[in-house]
Amino acid sequence: AKLGLKRFCILTMWLEAADYPTMLSCADLGVCLHTSTSGLDLPMKVVDMYGCGVPVCAVSFACLDELVQHERNGLVFDTSDTLAVQIQRLVDGFPNGAELRTLRDGVKTTVRWDANWRECARQVLVEGSKRSSALPGLLFAVVFAMLGAAVATDLFRRLGLAS
């Protein structure tokens, strides 16, 4: 209503889960407007885009640099004007502009979830299980409840906590 658009309609449709990565991988660039009220949570949509090889422009907040490294695998912005300038720069020479290519290459070298968990979480879980034999079982139960038996079993196998 604020824009005063006439004869304008926005339609949304359902997308099956299996089609989601296919749709994302068709994009050349993602834009993430996620902000964190706690300053501690990260936007999973960026993780989804990275998993499909898509760099992002993301609104800045406290811990975003844990995921988006400015000018390596994405760009960070604080204002709509900055976002507009970034998009303009990235479409310059499209589809093979140097800056967009650099960001795509950066996404390819971004550490993937399972590798990051093996590197960061395995030691914590192993040390924790030495202190409490209940910890691995409790964590397995949480992962099982959230993601299912196959994912929990695979995760624990990859972390070297299950055979």
Image (spheres, helix red, strand yellow):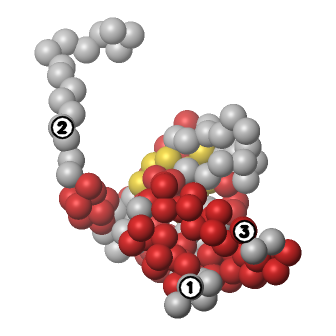
Asked if 58 appears above or below 96 in the picture, the reply is: above
**Secondary element at tag 3:** helix
Q: Residues within 10 Å of mark 2 (few under 14, many from 20)?
A: few
Give the residue at mark 3: 134
Q: How far apart are marks 2 and 1 (CA)?
A: 41 Å
Marked residue nearer the N-terminal end (3 or 1): 3
Q: Where is residue 55 in the image (x, y as percent from the top left)?
A: 46, 64
Q: In which quadrant of the rendered view does residue 22 lie?
A: bottom left
Q: In which quadrant of the rendered view does residue 39 lie?
A: top right
**Secondary element at tag 1:** loop
Give the residue at mark 1: 162
Q: Three-letter amino acid code at disc 1?
A: Ala
Give the residue at mark 2: 13
Label pair 2/1, CB-CB below 8 angstroms: no
- Give the left or right position of residue 118, taking residue 39 as reference: left
**Which of label 3 and label 1 is nearer to you?**
3
In the foreground, 122 or 76: 122
**Which of label 2 and label 3 is nearer to you?**
3
Residue at screen point 35% across, 14% down: 3
Asked if 88 appears above or below 4 in the picture, the reply is: below
Residue at screen point 30% across, 63% down: 21
Give the residue at the far left of this rendering.
Answer: 7
Q: How far apart are marks 3 and 1 (CA)?
A: 14 Å
- Give the left or right position of residue 148, taking residue 73 as reference: left
